[in-house]
Image (tube, grey):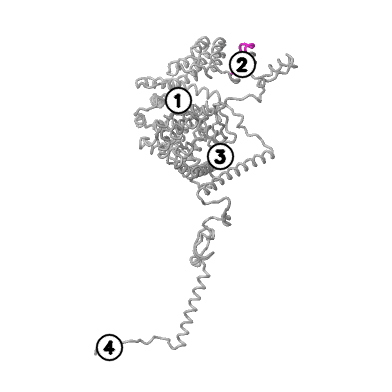
Amino acid sequence: MADAERLAKLREDLEKACKAQKFSKILKKANEVLNIDGEDADAKRCKAVALAKLDRCKEGLECCGDDEALQDVKAYCQYRLGDLEGALQASVDNEAVAHVRAQTLYKQGNYAEAADIYASLLFDEREDQPKRSAADRRELEANYYAACALAGKGREAISRLKPPDDPEQHHELAYNRGCCEAQCGATEATATLEKALSGAERAVEEDGASLQEKTDETAQYAAQLAYALERSGDSGQAVERAKTLLKQKPSDAAVRFAATCTLVAARRDETDLFDSHKRLKPYAASNFSDLSDKHAALGRLLWARTLFAMGKTQDALAALETPFTSPEDQCDAELLIAVHAQPEKQQKKKKAKGEDDTSPEALAKKRIADAEALIPAIEQALESVKTKNVDDYKLRFILAQAHHDCGRDAEAAQALSESSLADRPGVVATRAELLNKAGKKNEAVALLRTVRVQPDDNALRVAAQRLKFDDIEGCKEAIAIYPGNEPEDIAKKAVLAAFYDADEAEELVNQLPQDLVPQVDEDMTQEDVDKLLEAGVPKAWRTSRRENLNLVVQAKTPEELAEAKAKKRAAVLKRRKKRREAYLAKLQSEGKYDPKNPKPPDPERWIAKKQRSYNKRGRKNKGKFTGAQGGDISSKDAQKLDAKSRADERKAKDEKAKAERDAAIAAGLSGKKKRTGNRKRRGN
């Protein structure tokens, strides 16, 4: 009976420790429970989790053993210990294991698979799924953005998720979204990254960080912003951002290299070649061996491009001699060699066309001339790549773009058809579009019919593309394959059906819940309907692909400004309160703080520690002197700086000596003193 009461008391203490998240105490109480009841599953799980949280993952792994209920903790411990393959072997399918699996795949470089797992966690709307807090969802979204950015799926991520409501407050989430936008070339990337950088700088300043700490914390944000500016074509701003960041000397070598590459790439081989050469030379001296494969390939390409621009052809060829591991990088290298292998006259002619005329007609002519000059170099690079058995799809895409710029859409479609990705649905759609522009509509329709429609969202995309070329039967076939039965899926089908069969569209609309269907005004006449159709879409609803209307700065009233200021202040106070609670919880766990009996606050807590009374040497205000520049010196040193004090000291010393002489004379001791003791006799 005594053991049962003690066990109940220990379990109660263990529950309290779990609520307070005191992992050392959790471990202690769990061991006490297991000493009495070695089969207590809850205590065993608490012990395993506490060991993992205390970075004692090896002991946590031993605690988990082969227990099926602890497979998620076991996978986490294996991940922390570097056993990535073991972490992927967890057979239990729950959210915790999915998180570990996604993190493991991300660390292995399988970004696409990691992004798929994060997407399943984010967009799984089953009722048995646990409800997440806003903070947990933001963290999950940030991980999803990061995986998509590195997997080349940035457009998918930004289309499925909404931008953060307060980018400056949640700057890490905004930064990852900005990376996705920059990766897919979205115009709003720079604005998102600027807000993320501003939020990061504000958060660091509120933490009271030093200048170097602020630089290190925000360097990654600034480097990514410079890269986004370079991708958007704003080379001037990209160069300034990169140069400013490099002057601040961030501690992260990877960030410094990324900023250097952005700086060199933004200059376009036109200005400051010697500065670009100087910045890349230290990396080239070690043959870029200290960098990752991706960064090393980028560095080699930029180094060779700089050498070509400086006329050092042999050095540039030597830098590109070693084959690249990526076919895309190898294609870039071959194209770079081919471009600079053109005859000297052709190169001079190309340079001579760089006039200052910026009119649309002049720019269009220049673009066509550049494309015409690039086509022979691309064909030469294709011949070179063919002998090296490298996938040349990137060169085919560049060739198609060059033909399209010259107005030869049929040749562009032919170039795409010869690539290894010719049968991809997106590439097929582009080929069909080019054929249609070239006046070959029948060939475009036949080409779209060759696409193998999958029972997913791709079916609706294919249906819309076929409908664009008036292929009604092909559109119906694609819609029939789409399996979606949710209200949103039915609405998509109804929109497509409205373009070719009003009765079918109405039938699909009737399948929707009535609360989702907009109510039609029965009193509206046919004349009113015709007027609405003729009016078209209101201008306020129109958007442009090249313009984000959310970026326009709107004029605000004083009340709105005051409200925004109050919200900003409330956010700051909320963040401070959260940090204070975390700090007090930490002190309480260490036994340095008792909320029931708090210590009186230090009355000098607003003064710098060095200047507080209990940190000063000696008695209060003794031997202390503050100079004009804030230096601390002793009173003796201060007295040396005072001319009057030195004169008074000399005068007092002279008076003392005079008084001593007068006293000696009065005592009859003036002149030489008589010598005492034995005197040595002189010899006769």
- Residue 526, label in figure: none
Which residue shows up at 53% across the image and 24% down it? 362
Q: Callout 4: helix, strand or loop?
A: loop
Q: In this image, 581 relative to 97: left or right?
A: right
Q: Callout 2: helix, strand or loop?
A: helix
Camera-near label (3 vs 2) is 2
Residue 496 lies within the magenta run: yes
Q: Position of residue 681 (x, y in %)?
A: 27, 88
Q: Which residue is mark 1?
A: 350
For the record, the magenta segment spans 489-504
Q: Amino acid at mark 4?
A: Arg
Which label's residue is closer to the chain start, 3 or 1? 3
Q: Position of residue 543 (x, y in %)?
A: 61, 25
Which label's residue is closer to the chain start, 2 or 4? 2
Q: Callout 1: helix, strand or loop?
A: helix
Alpha-carbon span between mark 4 and mark 1: 115 Å
Which label's residue is closer to the chain start, 4 or 3? 3
Residue 473 seen in the current view: yes
How many other residues sit within 10 Å of disc 4, few (<14), some (14-19) or many (≥20)? few
Alpha-carbon span between mark 4 and mark 3: 98 Å
Q: Position of residue 595 (x, y in %)?
A: 57, 50
Alpha-carbon span between mark 3 and mark 1: 45 Å
How many other residues sit within 10 Å of disc 2, few (<14), some (14-19) or many (≥20)? many
Camera-near label (4 vs 1) is 4
